[in-house]
Image (cartoon, grey):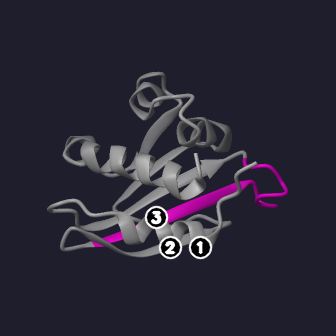
Amino acid sequence: MFRPTQNWADELCRELTYNGAEGIMVIKAVDAPSEISPLGILTLSLEFRNGSCVRAVLAESDQDGDYVIEGSYDVFMKIFEGKLPAFAAFALGKLRLAKGPLSRLADYMPLALEIVNKARRAAGF
């Protein structure tokens, strides 16, 4: 069973680039199993400067960013395992934009797909 680690987050960050990406994107998983996070929250913060990811922080607590995408831990695992497309998860209401302008986030959809694809690869899926 895949378990996100800081090393996985660092590897993911090293591989992420997207022309024009700036700011901090936070992916927040709620309802995480207690063996993953005693608080039930796992967040991945990805900081972008000049189109490149410069820092990744995996934490068992809330993190703040320019954009916060939230969903259950199970939904994110299904996305990373390739069992649920990220766009379908948004359309079905399984993921939501908890912070940030939706119109601006639309510009980052190619980056979102790259994050999912690189996260899958870093996780060995």
Q: Answer yes or no: do the residues labelled 3 and 1 have beta carbons within 8 Å?
A: no
The answer to whether any part of residue 101 appears in the image is no
Q: CA distance from mark 3 to mark 1?
A: 9 Å
Q: In the shown orientation, is residue 23 left or right of residue 55?
A: left
What amino acid type should be assigned to the residue bearing mark 1? Asn
Q: Answer yes or no: do the residues labelled 3 and 2 have beta carbons within 8 Å?
A: yes
Residue 103 vertical position relative to residue 46 in the rendered view, above or below: above
**Span shown in magenta:** 32-48
The answer to whether any part of residue 44 appears in the image is yes
Q: Is residue 45 magenta?
A: yes
Image disc number at residue 12: 3
User: Is disc 3 placed on a helix, strand or loop?
Assistant: helix
Q: In the shown orientation, is residue 53 left or right of residue 71?
A: left
Q: Is residue 123 magenta?
A: no
What amino acid type should be assigned to the residue bearing mark 2? Asp
What amino acid type should be assigned to the residue bearing mark 3? Leu
